[in-house]
Image (cartoon, rainbow, N blue to C red):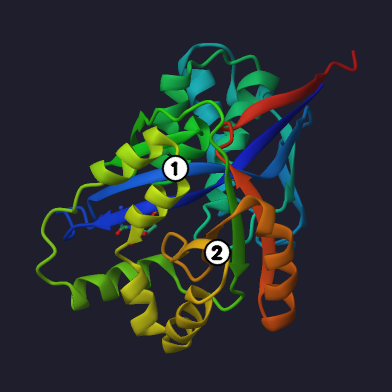
Amino acid sequence: MNVLVKAPAKINLALRVGAPRPDGFHPLDTVFTALDLADDVLATTADGLTMSIEGRGEDLPVDESNLVMKAARALQRLAVDKGQCNAEELGAHIHITKRIPVAGGMAGGSADAAGTLVALNELWGVGAEQEELLELAADLGSDVPFALFGGVAHGTGRGELLTPVGTPDDTKQSWIVLVNSEGLSTPAVFKAFDELFADAETPANTSALRDAIAIGDNHALAEHMINDLQPVAEHLRPDLAELFAQLNDLDGVYKVMLSGSGPSIVLLVEDDRSDQLATELGEQLPNLDVVQTTGPARGAHVVHEEDHN
Ligand code: C5P
């Protein structure tokens, strides 16, 4: 049997950050939107638990250190706790077709983990409810719950406590992502945030942005988009500051912003200018990978299921 799941990338429309909590994580007030840019997670019945990756990130480890394997183990434990079977009986091969840029602040690894939870829940017939999967997801990483949740959501806590944000039915955002291959590690960016903004306290709130989303106006949305980690990334990588200045002058762009903890950059663009802008940016910035996508999109969900028996 096999199960194919689509798992979306995310963008933080706003990312407000406070001073670290006793557990070291930073309290966030954030608004996520899920993108049509998605990885495929194909789970096939097999002996043991293995995984493979094609597309972007082919050189990533495929051992137990991969978040996909951790997600699979977490679901195995849940199935055993539900008294369904022994862990040894639950085998699968998980194949990831990766389109989401690796280490670019778009939660690609988190999407794969969320997709794995959904695919194996189906493949193994665990019957876990969304709430149970969200709980497992939060233990795997701060961005994993949203990859399950999808749509547009308000995130608090360390980003794992989610509430849906209503959008008009015809809401469409067109995005161009400039993928930066030179990494900025998430912990390093948060650590530098603490040094630069020692008086941060609680995160600023995102209510004005959520109001703008409810109206469905991209101009209003752009006005309230903000990422507290952007000045940090610019401090760590002055070349990014130069790039932001250059991009802000482009015609047809509502907003240019750092994606998550970076180093990728997202541009909210006019839909009918997206193709042309992507071509121009590709020519002007040959060192960056230019990816076009749209949103909002559904959270990780089954798209195909096949029983060979
Ligand atoms: O939760 P996740 O494993 O994705 O977090 C990776 C790292 O990012 C954490 O170890 C921490 O250094 C940082 N982080 C944080 N506050 C958050 C989310 C992540 O400090 N809210």
Rendered residue at 54%/63% (across/down): 253
Rendered residue at 51%/39% (across/down): 147
Residue 112 showing in the rendered view: no
Residue 180 marker: none
- Which x, y percent locates residue 44? 78, 30
Residue 245 to residue 221: above or below? below
Q: On the image, which quarter does residue 49 sit in?
A: top right
Residue 88 to residue 241: above or below? above
Sequence-first tag of 2 and 1: 2
Q: Which of 270 and 297 is in front in this view?
A: 270
Rendered residue at 68%/22% (across/down): 89
Residue placed under numbered mark 1 in the picture: 217
- Which x, y percent locates residue 159? 33, 44
Residue 195 showing in the rendered view: yes
Q: On the image, which quarter does residue 225 sit in?
A: bottom left
Mark in front: 2 vs 1 = 1
Q: Quadrant of the C terminus?
A: top right
Looking at the image, residue 279 sits to the left or right of residue 250; the answer is right
Quarter of the displayed picture in which ligand 1 can be seen: bottom left
- At label 1, counting other C-alpha atoms closer than 10 Å, the crowd grade (few under 14, some 14-19, many 20 or more) is some
Which residue reaches farthest right? 308
Looking at the image, residue 134 sits to the left or right of residue 94; the answer is left
How far is disc 2 from disc 1 in space, using C-alphas?
30 Å
Residue placed under numbered mark 2 in the picture: 103
SS class, disc 2 = loop
- Which x, y percent locates residue 22? 14, 54
Q: Type of residue at label 2? A: Ala
Q: Type of residue at label 1? A: Asp
Q: Are marks 2 and 1 in contact (CB under 8 Å)?
A: no
